[in-house]
Amino acid sequence: MGKKKRFDYFDAFKKLSELAVEESDLLIDAIENFGVAEDLREVMERAHEIEHRGDEQNHLIFRTVATDFITPIEREDIIELTQHLDDIIDYIEDVMQRFYMYDVHFMHDDALEFARLIKKSCVALDKAMEDFRNFKKSKKFKELVIDVNSYEEEADQLLIKVIRDLHTTDRDKPMRVLVWSQIFSRMEKCSDACEHAADSMSTILLKNV
């Protein structure tokens, strides 16, 4: 009887980071092609399908880590990184749902800039994940993680800018200020989630050198 093939955690992590990039692409598409909120139903279905694939991958990781006798890195690190990767996908889906739930009547000019920054964060994380399997030997891994952190800092600065703009240029439209403040805050959380995943990877590196 042949030996049972061991579960590849690093491959599973990579699948999740790829789904995050796919979800960020969909967010950009939703913003660039926005007409009215009602038209977002199809986009939300596509976003939920991506999120569902992420959930299936998460469940597979959690089932496996609970029964594996030996894991390539510590179990709690596997669980933490998986949760952070799941958060990215969930948070991006949440932004698209907010467009619909708040019945936005126009797409804010700064939303596309934020979405593109989210995608940069996801792509940088995905590139770092390519090297994560060989993090002990990789010469690029640390630099790739720094890229994720840099984009998160850009997102922080962009959030400050857009929230101030809302409260100065749209102060006579309180509902617009409220709705878009909440949406932009949720967009910034997407970049935060990418940084949290990158930080988890950095911690794993430090614990295993």
Image: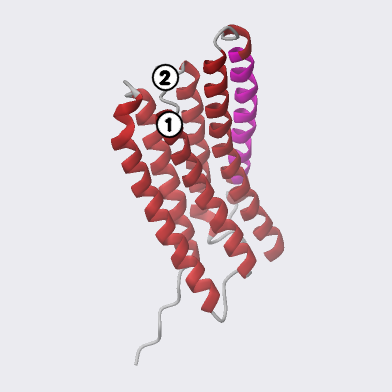
Q: Residue at x 53, y 48 (%)?
A: 87
Kindly identify the amino acid type of the residue bearing the numbered disc 2.
Met
Q: Is residue 177 above or below residue 131?
A: above
Q: Which residue carries the number 2 mark?
A: 107
**Viewer-nearest residue: 98 or 146:** 98
Q: Residue at x 37, y 36 (%)?
A: 26
The dominant secondary structure in magenta is helix
Quarter of the image that includes the C terminus: bottom right
Magenta run includes residue 118: no
Kindly identify the amino acid type of the residue bearing the numbered disc 1.
Met
Q: Which mark is residue 36?
A: none
Alpha-carbon neighbours of circle 2 within 10 Å: few (<14), some, or many (≥20)? some
Helix, strand or loop at label 2? It is loop
In the image, the segment drawn in magenta is 145-166
Q: Residue at x 35, y 30 (%)?
A: 29
Q: Position of residue 12 (x, y in %)?
A: 45, 61
Q: Which mark is residue 101?
A: 1
Q: Is residue 209 visible?
A: no
Quarter of the image that includes the N terminus: bottom left
Q: Residue furthest bottom?
A: 1
